[in-house]
Amino acid sequence: MKTFTASKSTALAAVSTVAGLAGAGMAFAGNGVPPTVELPELYVTSSHTAIVEPASTYGAPVSRLELNPQFDLQVRNLAEAQGDVSIRGGIFENTGFRVGAATLIDPQTGHYFSEIPIAPEMLEGPGLLVAADNAFGGFNSTVGTVDYAWTEIRDGGSAAVGFGDNSLNYQRLHQGRTFAAHGEDSWAAEMEISRSESAGTIENGDHNFVRYSGRLQRKSDAGQTDFFAGYQSKYLAWPELYAAPYGSNESDSVRTTLLMVNHAQAYGDDDRWEATAYFRRHHDHYLFNRFSDSLAFLHQTEVAGAAVTGAHRLSGRFAINYTAQLTADEIESSTLENNFTSRSYTKVAVLPEFLLYESGEESLTLRAGGSYDDTNRDPSKLSPIADLTYARGDDRYYLSMAQSTQVAGYTAIGGSTGGLFASNPDLDREVSRNLELGAVLSRGEWSLKAAAFAREDADLVDWTFSYDRTSARSARNVDIDTYGLELVASRRIGQWELLGSATLLDKDEDYGDASVDASFYALNFAETRLTGAVVWSPLERLQVRMDNEYRKQRENVLREGDDSAVFTHLGVYYSFPELQGLELNASVENLWQDDFQEIPGTPGRGRQTSVGARWSW
């Protein structure tokens, strides 16, 4: 929940703090002293996990989402290879990824939403937009949005190398440099190069990744402008990667280019605005059989978008929050058979904010407005947005009621009605209505966040399986009611920093079709999910970090093995006093080697261990 005083305008003020953490990789800073991570501040920095550098490859924006209580990352191969990000029991296509003011999309399929070739040091977050915040600030994402902001560039850099079992090796180089100020402005530049390869934790599960990213930044007292260019190339293989349950050894080669310009500006006492423009090209070459080109799927999507968001106070008790995004895309495909290969989107949202009561540290704030969504191929939709927030000191209690909508991707609506992936040209616009009651409490050494919600999804697009048609997974609309309870608590006790969470979900679904025997995504959710993050600093230069997750998944006829799982990721970090800036680390992912199928029918991952070194200057 964001109010006017705690909206994204605070990013300008928080950038310097978060940039320091991101540049250190949340391990050890260049001076050899462990950085202080105030766990009660996790709700501000969104650092809901102990480990931020993976054991299996170099870090990516999606890395911070794994075993994070705010997000459910359902992994194929490894998190940075192909991970579907869902929020509160939604599916991957209900989740948006916003950088600056603009949400990045891939019009073919939400499987590629998280392909963002930006170095983690360049981004603040991930933050989370849900309920009214997502209805207002999200774009073509009905349940939630992963929210990133640009950090301030700092002088310094690092070089990292790592090795592990399964023939893993990775290398990374990062450098930031500030230049002399010219008048009131200063300039800075940042670049990074990363690569990784491995034979994989199971047979035919190899990967080969490379990423190049760089930006130029202009900064003044009240504003920041970033010019970014990034490219990544990824080859990943995995048995039954997408087309379970057919026993195939599949592969996917993806290349992503991203160009972006972002400017954030503060003015007046609390006023601010931010504008973003971007171009994204994504190419994928998917093979049903990695050893043959006989069944290949080729797609290339291009997306151009521009967005603006801001807040302006008209008086001491009244403010206007606003956002707008225009996006156009097109696709070249070997599988789309109709003329549904381009689309333009428009979203405008206005959310007036009223300070109803204020006395000392107490305040009561009402936001009430709406959004307008339209495309050149679908009927438009008006949606109401409202929330009421009572604040007392650092504590907040809120009630939110909001509607959001989105349209289906091209694979779901624009392809063949047969074959491995059966599209449906009659899919309707998805409409989601959310009612939520929650609280956020902070008491210095501890914090607590609690939320209860009910969500009604009408015409949600899901992919389903039927025993009457075993040769295809089919796209279809479904009506689903979702009920959820979330609790996230953090505590600092001496050398220990602890964070725990519990999430309970239940769903009532209606496909209107008795032939549906299983759901790959909409009904692939954890009915019970518990997470625990631990940071232990027994010595000044030694840290042990651990993330844990237990989940009890809803039963699914396609899943082989158990419907429950326990995952643990562990990392140990040591900074040498004799060699300033040198850090050694040892990490393991999936410590208990749980082979739980996160996607029904797709084999689970194995255990990955690695050791590495980082030199920071």
Image (spheres, rainbow, N blue to C red):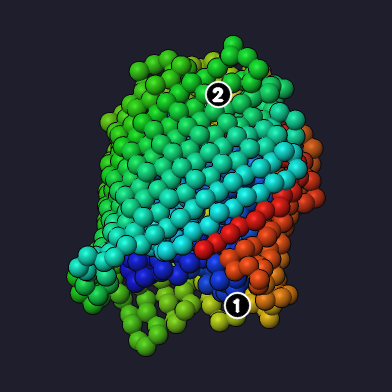
Residue at image point 42% right, 64% down: 155
Q: Give the left or right position of residue 43, taking residue 354 as reference.
A: right
Residue at the extreme front: 578
Secondary structure beneath dot 1 equals strand
Secondary structure beneath dot 2 equals strand
Amino acid on which disc 1 is placed: Trp
Q: Which residue is mark 2?
A: 286
Q: Which image quadrant for residue 599?
A: top right
Q: Residue 314 at what x, y percent from top left?
A: 19, 70
Decide which of tag 2 and tag 1 comes sooner along the chain: 2
Residue at the extreme bottom: 360
Residue at image point 75% right, 30% down: 203
Q: Is residue 516 visible?
A: no
Foreground: disc 2 or disc 1: 2
Q: Which image quadrant for residue 594?
A: top right
Residue at image point 59% right, 21% down: 287
Q: Which residue is mark 1?
A: 446
Residue situated in front as seen by the camera: 407 or 447: 447
Q: Residue 364 at what x, y percent from top left?
A: 37, 76
Amino acid on which disc 2 is placed: Tyr
Q: Residue 174 at what x, y percent from top left?
A: 49, 53
Q: Give the left or right position of residue 426, taking residue 111 as reference.
A: left
